[in-house]
Image (cartoon, helix red, strand yellow):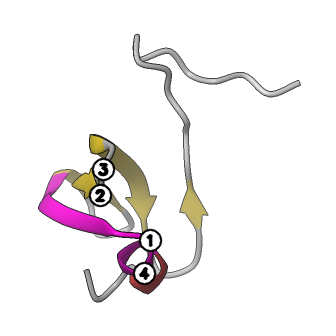
């Protein structure tokens, strides 16, 4: 987990990384992560050189709405 040093410090371990969508301008990255003592999560984000966009989802895959 060399690109996520803070996660590694907290006990996160990347089990698998997939890129389900990619263009010359952006990549959609999915990391399946094992969190020590808590199980696995799927962490999905838009990866590019200049910014990041995170969309939090509930267990029922609904987008979390912040007021």
| Separation of marks 3 and 1 at Cα, in angstroms | 11 Å
Counting from the top left corner in percent of width and height, residue 31 is at: 24, 56
With 67 as the anchor, is 43 left or right in this view?
A: left
Residue at left offset 42%, top offset 53%:
45
The disc at residue 37 is: 3
Q: Regarding mark 4 in the picture, which secondary structure is present there?
A: helix
Residues marked 1 and 2 touching at CB (< 8 Å): yes
| Separation of marks 2 and 4 at Cα, in angstroms | 11 Å
| Separation of marks 4 and 3 at Cα, in angstroms | 14 Å
Label 4 sits on residue = 9
Question: Could one spot residue 31 in this view of the protein?
Answer: no
Q: Residues within 10 Å of mark 2 (few under 14, many from 20)?
A: few
Residue at left offset 23%, top offset 67%:
13
The N terminus, quarter of image: bottom left
- Foreground of the two, 10 or 43: 10
- Foreground of the two, 48 or 39: 39
Magenta region includes residue 9: yes
The disc at residue 10 is: 1
The mark nearer the N terminus, 4 or 3, is: 4
Residues marked 4 and 1 touching at CB (< 8 Å): yes
In this rendering, the label closer to the viewer, 4 or 3: 3
Residues marked 2 and 3 touching at CB (< 8 Å): yes
Q: Which residues are magenta?
A: 7-19
Label 2 sits on residue = 36
Q: Is 47 placed above or below 6 here?
A: above
Magenta region includes residue 65: no
């Amino acid at each position: 987990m060399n690109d996520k040093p803070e996660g590694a410090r907290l006990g996160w371990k990347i089990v698998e990384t997939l890129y389900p969508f990619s263009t010359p301008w952006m990549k959609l990255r999915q990391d399946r992560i094992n969190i020590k003592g808590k199980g696995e999560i799927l962490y999905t984000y838009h990866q590019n050189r200049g910014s990041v966009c995170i969309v939090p989802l509930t267990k029922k895959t609904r987008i979390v709405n912040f007021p």
